[in-house]
Image (tube, grey):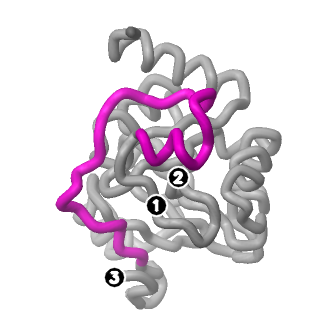
Amino acid sequence: MKLPAQRMNEVVRQVEQQGVVACPAEAVWGLTCDPLSEEAVLQLLAMKQRSVSKGLIIVAASVHMLAPLLAPLSSAQRYELELSWPGPNTWLVPNWGLYPDWITGESEEIAIRVTKAPALASLSYRLGRPLVSTSANPAGAQPARHSFQVVRYFGQGLVRAPGVVDLEATPSTIRRVSTGEVLRA
């Protein structure tokens, strides 16, 4: 049996090699990869049977990792975002051309969050950049809340980070920074 540190090293290697991994996020297990690797993102979308047109959420271990996306916002908007993090608050902000369309889909906005999930934050810190995080389930299926569900959906071969999700938590709230509109409560 691999120790958590050994498993985390394996997770880091997999993402560095343009692979997809499973990682416990705040409320559900997520599929995670490097957002700048088209190969990894397309693999993740194929696993989920999800269209590239829908876009994906980018998560980071710290606000500083999202600075290029936040800098053009007003100070009031940045303050509101930073006050809501780390935690289950995802914001749609203008993309400013920083991320490719395989991340943003058909939108000019990008969904971002600073995570408080230990394994996901650790992975982002170790790689030194934001990552994709989307629920670990095929389209239309219930999101995985346990590691065994991830295995059921995607097989034993998918590398999984150590950890668990908070079973009391709910998926992140999604808001649009420009209007404050709540898209998912």
Q: Residues within 10 Å of mark 1 (few under 14, many from 20)?
A: many
Element under disc 3: loop
Do tag 1 and tag 3 residues touch (Cβ < 8 Å)? no
Q: Which numbered marker is on residue 185?
A: 3
Name which residue lies at 36% across and 53% down: 145
What is the quadrant of residue 156 in the picture? top right
Do tag 2 and tag 1 residues touch (Cβ < 8 Å)? yes
Element under disc 2: loop
**Three-letter code, disc 2:** Ala
What is the quadrant of residue 64 in the picture? top left
Q: Position of residue 4 (x, y in %)?
A: 34, 16
**Three-letter code, disc 1:** Pro
On the rendered image, what quadrant is the C terminus found in?
A: bottom left
Q: Nearer the viewer, residue 151 or 87?
A: 151
**Three-letter code, disc 3:** Ala
Q: Position of residue 170 (x, y in %)?
A: 28, 67
- The Cα–Cα distance between marks 2 and 3, rounded to whole angstroms, is 20 Å
Looking at marks 2 and 3 on the same chain, the residue that comes earlier in the sequence is marked by: 2
What range is drawn magenta here? Answer: 148-174
Q: Is residue 170 above or below residue 126?
A: below
Residue hosting label 2: 136
Q: Position of residue 175 (x, y in %)?
A: 42, 79
Q: Is residue 130 visible?
A: no
- The Cα–Cα distance between marks 2 and 1, rounded to whole angstroms, is 6 Å
Closer to the eye: label 1 or 3: 1
On the rendered image, what quadrant is the N terminus found in?
A: top left
Closer to the eye: label 2 or 3: 2
Q: Nearer the viewer, residue 34 or 108?
A: 34
- Side of 83 relative to 105 (left or right): left
Q: Which numbered marker is on residue 74?
A: none
Q: Which numbered marker is on residue 143?
A: 1
For residue 18: magenta? no
